[in-house]
Image: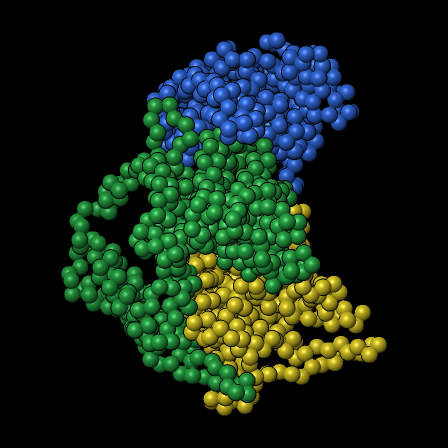
Chain colours: A yellow, B green, C blue
Amino acid sequence: MAVFIQQLINGLTLGAIYGLIAIGYTMVFGIIGMVNFAHGDLFMVSAFIALIVFVLLTSVLGIGSIALALLIVLVVGMLLTSLWGWAIERVAYRPLRGAFRLAPLISAIGVSIFLSNFVQVIQGARNKPTPPMIRDVIVLFESQGYTVALAYKQLMIMVVTAILLAAFWYVVQKTPLGRAQRACAQDQRMAALLGVDVDRTISLTFVMGAALAAVAGTMYLVYYGVVSFSDGFVPGVKAFTAAVLGGIGSLPGAVLGGIVIGLIETLWSAYFSIEYKDVAAFSILAITLIFLPQGLLGKPDVEKV
Amino acid sequence: MAVLSQSTAAGAEARVPDRFVSASKDAGFAALVTLGLCVPLVTLRTDSEEGGELILVPRLGLTAALCLAIFFARLGYLLLWGKEARAARQPTSRKEAIKTVATPRHSLTTIGLPIALGFAIAYPLLVTVINGGLSEARYWIDLGILVLTYVMLGWGLNIVVGLAGLLDLGYVAFYAIGAYSYAILSTTFHISFWVCLPIAGMLAATWGVLLGFPVLRLRGDYLAIVTLAFGEIIRLVLINWVPVTNGGAGIASIPRASFFGLPFNDDDDGFAAFFHLEFSPMHRIVFLFYLILALATLTSIVTTRLRRLPVGRAWEALREDEIACRSLGINTTTTKLSAFATGALFGGLAGSFFAVRQGFVSPESFNFLESAIILAIVVLGGMGSQIGVVIAAAVMIAGPEMLRNLGFLKAIFGENFDPSEYRLLIFGLAMVVMMIWRPRGLVSTREPTVFLKERKSISSDLVKEGHG
Amino acid sequence: MRGETLLRVEHLTMRFGGLVAVNDLSFTAKAGDITALIGPNGAGKTTVFNCITGFYKPSEGRVALAHGGEAAFAAIEEATEKGARTLSVGDGAIHLLERMPDYIVTQHARVARTFQNIRLFSGMTVLENLLVAQHNPLMLASGYSVLGILGLSSYTTRQREAVELAKAWLERIGLTERADDPAGDLPYGAQRRLEIARAMCTKPILLCLDEPAAGLNPRESLELNTLLRDIRDRDETSLLLIEHDMTVVMEISDHVVVLDYGVKIADGSPEQVKNDPKVIGAYLGVEDEEVAAVEAEVEGRA
Ligand SMILES: Nc1ncnc2c1ncn2[C@@H]1O[C@H](COP(=O)(O)OP(=O)(O)OP(=O)(O)O)[C@@H](O)[C@H]1O
Ligand SMILES: [Mg+2]
């Protein structure tokens, strides 16, 4: 039981990170029906930005307070990653707006390959370990000699995720920007005719997705304390899986999917075999889709004849 | 943003200095964005010190160089190929220009393949003559083998994506299944290549059906993620199922193919002795070249024939409108399955070839990047077009390989410069640029499968790309 | 067998969530007839078609089609109880369409259809469209592709016959000249005719047309009437027709069924239906009692 609760905590933390990335996939898919394959690599880029800024703040500028440093890292990371998100959309996807469906997908795969290799060339191929950041834990209880603990960083990840989700949920549901996004998702041409600036709305969607990826990147760095240029692909695919599992296009679905994937992964590793944790996650995706073709929270897609 | 739209709004009559100013502004903006992107990713490089602590190495020069490069690239682009530049150069409207280009060119698609085949047959001879010897031409023949392997893979995937309109992001799984089938059957059971080849193809096709059956009712991007997941599952199983696959270490010493029973060695019963030739290790390489050429040609012939059969027409109809297909009594599930299985079959055959050529297989060869490359070849070639796939494979595979030869760049960038490090970086960029340049691929028109009076190519505007 | 019952729709109900699109609908269609299904927008006509052709599974009810004469209906209860899709009766057979997947309805029960918004294979040529419609017999002839790949002559002969059938239909719809053009390039009216010809290439005994005259100009509309009558009289095919254009309906149909809000409100000859106050009320959007008043008002103004 104790082990189970501990794994539950770990799974939720991991799921929160996946969820944050998954929102980027889901929002972009919702609005332009495209799988932004480069999103996972953007997440990796943001982790690198966070790493560099963190080292800059702590060892070069000598800021002593980790909390303050992390806050600055988060803000700077979100800004710079958003710029990346904006630039990628502008250069690689916008010229393909309205082109046939596979062209942006291939372009996105190209961006993904470019980003990971760019970081490899520019920052080196080796793993980059960070100085340890937050090591304290809250001991929840002990049973049969097994200590169940909630690390502060896990708590932080969950809290930050929850706050940001609430904020983005508000933006999408209650603001004019959110309304414009939903209008573009329904029918871009009609939205444009009614005075919605479609290009700007789509740009902002990418910016929002990138900002959330930056949060995920920072959290990832804090949680694992190491990052490398190839760390974008696997979390990216997992988050995409989460988005599809939750029902692509649905924000709560993305988070739910992220948590489900995170839990499957940690529980499978704990009780079965760590080698096959990804196989388990992917298989559960396939099985879920066979029985629920629109994902957990997606709108069933009625085939009107 | 504002600068961008202003510059386009300036209209065709803008005078040259105006154009220059607005282009410079635009380029300046691009440079500024580049600066934002480079800070801190480029400007500060993280390096590990002795104790493992990270230190930051500033690289202001590189940052400045990148920003300047983007500035001049953007400026040059706007002045030479920008909207206004083009408008200034040709007063006729762009629409007209497009029309004249867009008249269907039957020639490329109908005579392109025979020409490509002829060239491929002559290729080993050609490179031997040019390089002054068979052994000297080894690099080129190897490159030819590589390109042909991707041509075959592209053609195989083309059946699934280009004809049936089903997005498959895990095609490499079938390539892996073919490769490992041969590797395991030959090393464990000592079965010869010629027996294994069809077995590997059939195994891959069977897996295609097994995977396809549950997932083919999924649409579009759901199908894409499930096929991607399948590709990853296969790779992970190859890594972790050590007793059978030998895990990440891979399977080595896979027996080589023989020339219909004659091994390529300098024994008395070898290929060289039998044909009274002097033994050369190049015989095997040339043989491999013609083997993959034959396999690729087989793929092409079978696909061309299938397209003219009811099943091929049903694939294309499925891509155009699945509901209409069902209203005409077509069982869409079996039709999709047949496309999936046929594509997988050729992937499996190519995989066997890969294993016999390398003599070594490991899970690393079958990662997502391979699937992405093959898909990019299909899309860039023009979905459904066979000659397009040939051109795209040559560009995408041979192009980056050429980078390895650019040793002279060392003279410019210093001795530490390794051009092959930039191979994938440029590859990724090229994928983006080529998609923007030709979103519908190089050969985008569709050739009808039958005609009454005249064969007319169908413009890509009318051809759909499928939803599944 | 003309004049015998071909299709029996019994207590058909189709619900989408809370919405009842078709409610307890029963009617029959006779062989050799053109049966029209009319009603205001949203009445549930297309939904009835979708239930007949297997695209939707009805929530309740039965849709039975007889091959080889109405005697086959004698076995309807037996088939229902057995859970069979098809039951042979003498040299005929009874088909329970609501149990069949869509493609089986066309392949075995030989019911073909067109769509309200045209669904051609726009990137394929006109001729190819007509060949795709002959998929099943051609597939058989090509030995499920295996023999076809080897280039067997029996397949070549069969394919030539298929092209001949397509040519005959192109002749009938006046598109011979455009056989090698992509279907998406045809003008609207020609696309509608091509869709009908494509459905006919499956050799159906019942052809369901969803608003075939929509968007046609008056001349094309007249040509369509001729084509439909021609199909009824020359081919062994009966027609079920959804149509808003009353002149077309009155002109060519032998029997009219009227739907409103998913419920049948009239059923009879065109003459009977035309004068039914319920029908007029449904189309004018008023209650039955007010029909007389509204009519008087309209006439008074005119
Ligand atoms: N797949 C579906 N899911 C939900 N509701 C549906 C579906 N198909 C039809 N409906 C609803 O059923 C009702 C009847 O629709 P239907 O298309 O059958 O009308 P119709 O008589 O063909 O109208 P029209 O003359 O406009 O074509 C409508 O309210 C429609 O919105
Ligand atoms: Mg309708």
Depth check: give the residue in front, B139 or C15.
Answer: B139
B125 to the left or right of C266? left
Residue appearing at x 46%, y 75% in the figure: A124
Residue B138 seen in the figure: yes
Residue appearing at x 40%, y 30% in the figure: C125
Depth check: give the residue in front, A249 or C39.
Answer: A249
Depth check: give the residue in front, C177 or C213.
Answer: C177
Residue appearing at x 45%, y 54% in the figure: B281
A47 to the left or right of B97? right
A269 to the left or right of A132? right
User: Quarter-wise, where is residue B434 in the image?
Assistant: bottom left
Residue C52 location (% of width, % of height):
61, 27
Residue A194 seen in the figure: no
Residue A285 location (% of width, % of height):
64, 54
Is residue A51 placed above or below C246 in the rendered structure? below
Marker count (numbered): 0
Residue C75 location (% of width, % of height):
74, 17
Residue C192 location (% of width, % of height):
44, 26
User: Quarter-wise, where is residue B336 in the image?
Assistant: top right
Depth check: give the residue in front, A261 or C139.
Answer: C139
Residue appearing at x 42%, y 31% in the figure: B449
Q: Quadrant of the N terminus of chain A?
A: bottom right
Q: Residue furthest right?
A: A144
Q: Quadrant of the C terminus of chain A?
A: top right
